[in-house]
């Protein structure tokens, strides 16, 4: 039987991230720090998560991954996987463009982008805005199948707003709920929900 929605979402998010600090997990769950910590402690008590004290990181355990896989199967009964697949298929070509855009944000003429050319950066941010506009209805389609996908829209919008406000790490920064962080989490969520291995996806994309 599925646990309450918050408990499932906490395990689901930790399974997606593998390892993450509590503040990022709280942001992903849209919970306050204390409430998020309480949910993580429940997972630890059940042997589904561990806390690496010296690094301040939470990590899903092998038992947690097994439990999550079983709960995800239970959650996606009644044809939900089939209803998610069209959104996933629409996501893939946008994902290709997003990855290429990330490369051009990080590198310029083969060297690291030092973000000293505001015109260059502004053009890349504008491109990301176009990607965001295309992605928003796809996420809405996914959220119509499982409401938890709606959180991605909020978090992607938040990262884009931070980037437009001058926070350069909000584009491709690591472990800061950057646009790239959230995007990769969304991609991973779709792969897990649809039981697709990333390597198989890449082979299929390469064969087209």
Image (tube, rainbow, N blue to C red):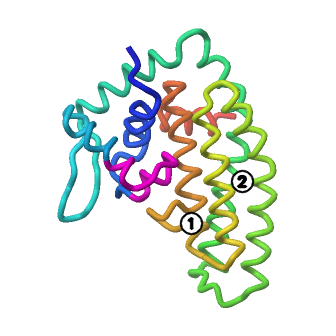
Report which quarter residue 129 is drawn in.
bottom right
Disc assigned to residue 97:
2
Disc assigned to residue 110:
none
Of all residues, the one furthest to the bottom in this rendering is 116
Of badges 1 and 2, nearer the viewer stands 1
Residue at 58% across / 81% down in the picture? 111
Residue at 56% across / 66% down in the picture? 172
Residue segment shown in magenta: 23-37
Across and down, in percent, residue 206 comes to 62, 39
In the image: residue 51, left or right of residue 169: left
Judge whether residue 33 is colored magenta: yes
Q: How many marks?
A: 2
| Of callouts 1 and 2, the N-terminal one | 2
Q: Quadrant of the C terminus?
A: top right
Q: Secondary structure at mark 1?
A: helix
Question: How would you classify the magenta stretch by its main secondary structure?
Answer: helix
Q: Is residue 51 above or below residue 203?
A: below
Across and down, in percent, residue 138 comes to 74, 38
Q: Quadrant of the N terminus?
A: top left
Label 1, residues with CA under 10 Å away: few <14, some 14-19, many ≥20: many
Q: Secondary structure at mark 2?
A: helix
Asked if the residues shown at circle 1 and circle 2 are in contact, with their CB atoms under 8 angstroms apart, the answer is no
Label 2, residues with CA under 10 Å away: few <14, some 14-19, many ≥20: few
Residue at 43% across / 57% down in the picture? 24
Judge whether residue 75 is colored magenta: no
Residue at 72% across / 73% down in the picture? 164
Read off the residue under disc 1.
Answer: 172
Report which quarter residue 194 is drawn in.
top right
Q: Nearer the viewer, residue 7 or 76?
A: 7
């Amino acid at each position: 039987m599925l646990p309450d929605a918050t408990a499932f979402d906490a395990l689901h998010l930790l399974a997606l991230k593998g390892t993450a600090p509590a503040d990022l997990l709280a942001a992903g769950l849209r919970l306050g720090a204390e409430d998020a910590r309480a949910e993580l402690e429940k997972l630890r008590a059940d042997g589904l998560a561990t806390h690496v004290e010296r690094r301040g990181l939470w990590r899903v355990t092998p038992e947690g991954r097994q439990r999550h896989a079983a709960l995800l199967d239970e959650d996606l009964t009644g044809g939900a996987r089939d209803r998610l697949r069209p959104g996933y298929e629409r996501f893939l070509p946008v994902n290709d463009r997003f990855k290429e855009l990330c490369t051009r944000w990080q590198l310029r003429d083969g060297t690291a982008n030092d973000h000293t050319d505001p015109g260059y950066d502004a053009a890349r941010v504008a491109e990301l805005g176009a990607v965001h506009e295309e992605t928003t209805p796809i996420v809405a389609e996914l959220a119509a199948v499982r409401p938890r996908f709606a959180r991605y829209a909020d978090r992607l919008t938040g990262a884009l707003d931070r980037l437009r406000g001058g926070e350069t790490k909000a584009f491709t920064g690591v472990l800061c709920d950057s646009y790239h962080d959230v995007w990769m989490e969304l991609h991973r969520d779709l792969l897990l929900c649809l039981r697709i291995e990333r390597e198989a996806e890449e082979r299929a994309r390469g064969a087209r």
